[in-house]
Each structure stands twice: as structure tokens, then as C-alpha cells.
Amino acid sequence: MALESLMVPLGTPAPEFALPDLDGRTHRLSDYANGPGLLVVFACNHCPYVKHLENELGAVIDASGVPAVAICTNDADAYPDDKPEGLRAQAERAGWTFPYLIDATQSVGRVFGAACTPDFFLYDANLLLTYRGAFDESTPGNGKPVTGSELRAALTAVRAGKPAPEPQRPSMGCSIKWRAV
């Protein structure tokens, strides 16, 4: 089921996190405190919306000079394609060079306010939210080219120490697959 991002208020501080990557190394928010900013992408392997843009996503992030992490917060027991081996295959297929983190408890996804995959949270040099929105106008089947134009503009602004452009449209994708509580 397609869902839009929650549009967390701009200026919200980046939540603390400590999550393992696919090789078991722990990544923390503090690892990114001295950079130009941080892009956090909630992603997964099974979602057609993520698959639709995954190749261009890697290229946009690589060209930006802004550190990034992808986080899979889905219930991998219910969605086995989102287990670590599936995520590793996706990262290799898409040419992702940024860490892919596993939120097995789903607590990080909840504290960020992630709602869908993909869901983008771009923080400035002070780790305050400056962009939460769409990758571009393309979605599976709408015929518009995958360009990453909206996220690219936001990353360029953050790299230059400026606020991300507005207005910002919500991202759209598959709902996060939360475990029953």
C-alpha cells in the first residue's frame, strides 16, 4: 500500500542511533557530527518504489559529498527479502557505497518518524532537519524520468551550508512493515 512520508517538522534534531551495518560495524549519529550534514534514507529491498530509484539514488548520493546511511526498519521475518542477505544484494545491484544499517528492533524508524520506503531525512551541519521529501516526481508507472532532482537540490544546498529549497513534497512509497506491538 502506497503511503506518504509524515513530513516531520523542519529544524527537528536528528535522533540518536546506534545500528549495525551489513558487516556488523555499529554506526552512530555522533559519527557524522563533523560533516556537512547527513542524509538518512529509510529503504528496503522488496519495495517497488525503492527499486524504481535505487540506481539513481546511489549516483545522487555519491555526487553530493554529503554522508548518507540507508536504514532498513522493516519486519524482516514477515518480509524475508529485507533480511541482511537481501539488503546486501540490493546494495551491490544498485552500486550503493554508503552504509546500509539494520534496525531490527524498529525503534530507530519510530523515533525518526519514518512512514514509508523510501523516506528521506536530510540534516544540515548542525544535524537539524532541513529536508524531508520526495526524491523527484517519478514513481513506478507514472512515466516520469528518475532524476533525483528534488533530493539533489536539497543535498546541494546542505553542502553549501544553505537551507534546502521549499516547498517540499512528501516522499511516497510502501508503508514501513511494522511488527505487531
Image (cartoon, rainbow, N blue to C red):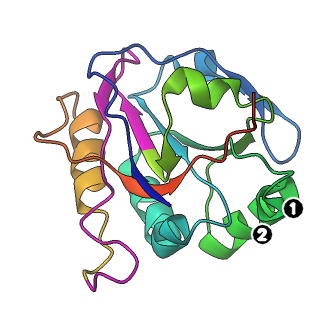
**Residue 115 location in percent, x, y?**
49, 40
Q: Which residues are magenta?
A: 120-143
* Amino acid bearing label 1: Glu
Residue drawn at x 27%, y 86% is 143
Q: Residues within 10 Å of mark 2 (few under 14, many from 20)?
A: few
Check if residue 126 falls in the magenta segment.
yes
Please give left or right for residue 101 compared with residue 13 in the image: right
Q: Using the image, tell me which numbered label, if any, was put on residue 85.
A: 1
Q: Using the image, tell me which numbered label, if any, was put on residue 48.
A: none
Q: Quadrant of the C terminus?
A: top right
Q: Report, in whole angstroms, how far the alpha carbon at label 1 lies from the one at label 2.
A: 6 Å
For the residue pair 174 and 39, the one nearer the viewer reads as 174
* Amino acid bearing label 2: Ala
Residue drawn at x 77%, y 69% is 89
Please give left or right for residue 53 compared with residue 130 in the image: right
Q: Is residue 51 above or below residue 79?
A: below
Please give left or right for residue 131 compared with residue 31 in the image: left
For the residue pair 37 and 180, the one nearer the viewer reads as 180
Q: Using the image, tell me which numbered label, if any, was put on residue 89.
A: 2
**Residue 155 location in percent, x, y?**
30, 44
Q: Is residue 68 above or below residue 78?
A: above
Q: Main secondary structure of the magenta part?
A: loop
Quadrant housing residue 162: top left
Residue drawn at x 41%, y 36% is 121
**Residue 137 location in percent, x, y?**
24, 66
Residue drawn at x 34%, y 26% is 8
Check if residue 31 falls in the magenta segment.
no
Secondary structure beneath label 2: helix
Q: Are marks 1 and 2 in contact (CB under 8 Å)?
A: yes
